[in-house]
Every structure is written in structure tokens, then in C-alpha cells.
Image: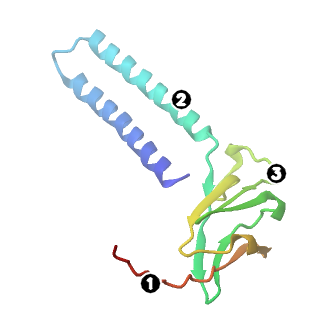
């Protein structure tokens, strides 16, 4: 579960807790009738049910995972390394367009496990992608990619730096 999902679900839970606390406070209020308290409780339960349904729909969405990468250089190349264990080379797409490289793929689970049977579920299964702006000009057509022991290594040769040219301005 991503940090964003955890944050949002935490806020939803807090708002549900606030409704419960508000309901308890209002029960103590002598000016409310039993019908008023019943309506408040019914309204609170309806909101909580809607939140739970929305949470489940949101959690069931197919979201794309993001790769962790190291990007560095040596004298001649830009090198990108990423851990993508469990992915077949034919399930990885690498596109270079101008100054951006995009790595996409899919990690498929080899078996199906019911949610109730999990003790922990931390591994990401499904589609993933990562786009990286390249810090220098490269020769995209000379790119090499290798997958070895679950580590993807992409080597992109740097383009030769163009020489600075001085231009003299003529007067008329």
C-alpha cells in the first residue's frame, strides 16, 4: 500500500472516529430527543458504509508501481540500475525519447492467494513503470540493456559534447 493510500485511509478513519465522538457527545446533550439521536446514528452509519465502499473500490483499482533506480555516469556512459526480480526480459519495455527514458513492465504472481490467507503482503505484483529525465545528451540508438540476477542494467553511451563556436557579429 502506498504512503498516499495510507495517509488518505488514515484521514478517513479519523473522520469516522470524529463522527463517533460527536455522536457520543450529542447523546449526553439533554436537548436531543431519542429520535434525534437515532437519526444521528443512522446518518453516521450511512456515511461510514459509504466510506468503506469507496475505500474498497479505490483499493481494488489497478495502480501502477514505480521502480526504484540508481542513475549514474562514468566517462562514456549513463548507467541505470534497477532491481526487478521476478520479471522476464520479454515483459520489459524500454523507450528513449529525446532526453527521457521510460522503463515499463509487469511482474506476475505465479499463484493466487486469497487475501485472508496472507500474514504479510509487501511484494508488488502487476504493472510498473518509471520515467527518468536523462541528465546529458545520449546516443539512444546505442543503448544496451541486460537483466542479470534480478538487476536490470541499462547502459546508454553519452553523445560527444559539441564544441562551443564563437560567432562574430558584422556591422552594416
Residue occupying the point 61% across, 63% down? 98
Quarter where residue 37 is shown: top left
**Image-based side of 39 in relation to 75, left or right:** left
Disc 3/disc 2 C-alpha distance (Å): 27 Å
Instruction: Judge depth for marks 2 and 1 and give the one in front.
Output: 1
- Residue shown at 32%/30% (left/top)? 19
Q: Relative to 127, is 70 on the left or the right?
A: left
Q: Which residue is mark 3?
A: 111
- Residue extending furthest toward the bottom: 75
Specify the quadrant of the image occupied by residue 87.
bottom right
Q: Residue 100 vs residue 144: left or right?
A: left
Residue 166 bears which disc, if any? 1
| Residue occupied by mark 2 | 53
User: At numbered mark 2, what does the secondary structure look like: helix, strand or loop?
Assistant: helix
Label 2 to label 1: alpha-carbon separation: 66 Å
Residue 12 image offset from top left, x and y in percent: 41, 38
Please name which of the two marks, 1 or 3, marks the residue nearer to the observer. Answer: 1
Q: Nearer the viewer, residue 83 or 105?
A: 105
Q: Position of residue 104 (x, y in %)?
A: 69, 57
Q: Which residue occupies the extreme left position in the image?
A: 31
User: What's the mark number on residue 48?
Assistant: none
First reached walking from the N terminus: tag 3 or tag 2: 2
Q: Position of residue 144 (x, y in %)?
A: 76, 75
73 shown above or below 152: below
**Residue 154, placed above or below residue 131:** below
Q: Position of residue 73 (x, y in %)?
A: 59, 83
Residue ID at (48%, 54%) = 3
Q: Are marks 1 and 3 in contact (CB under 8 Å)?
A: no
Circle 1: element type: loop
Amino acid at each position: 500500500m502506498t504512503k498516499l493510500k495510507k495517509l488518505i485511509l488514515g484521514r478517513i478513519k479519523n473522520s469516522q472516529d470524529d463522527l463517533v465522538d460527536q455522536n457520543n457527545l450529542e447523546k449526553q446533550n439533554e436537548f436531543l430527543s431519542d429520535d434525534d439521536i437515532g437519526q444521528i446514528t443512522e446518518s453516521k452509519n450511512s456515511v461510514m458504509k459509504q466510506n468503506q465502499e469507496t475505500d474498497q473500490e479505490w483499493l481494488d483499482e489497478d495502480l501502477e508501481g514505480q521502480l526504484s533506480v540508481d542513475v549514474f555516469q562514468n566517462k562514456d556512459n549513463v548507467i541505470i540500475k534497477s532491481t526487478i526480480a521476478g520479471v522476464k526480459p520479454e515483459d520489459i519495455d524500454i523507450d528513449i525519447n529525446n532526453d527521457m527514458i521510460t522503463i515499463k513492465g509487469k511482474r506476475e504472481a505465479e499463484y493466487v492467494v486469497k487475501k485472508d490467507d496472507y500474514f504479510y503482503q509487501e511484494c508488488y505484483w502487476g504493472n510498473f513503470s518509471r520515467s527518468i529525465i536523462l541528465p546529458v545528451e545520449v546516443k539512444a540508438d546505442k543503448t544496451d540493456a541486460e537483466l542479470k540476477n534480478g538487476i536490470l542494467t541499462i547502459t546508454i553511451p553519452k553523445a560527444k559534447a559539441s564544441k562551443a563556436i564563437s560567432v562574430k557579429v558584422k556591422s552594416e
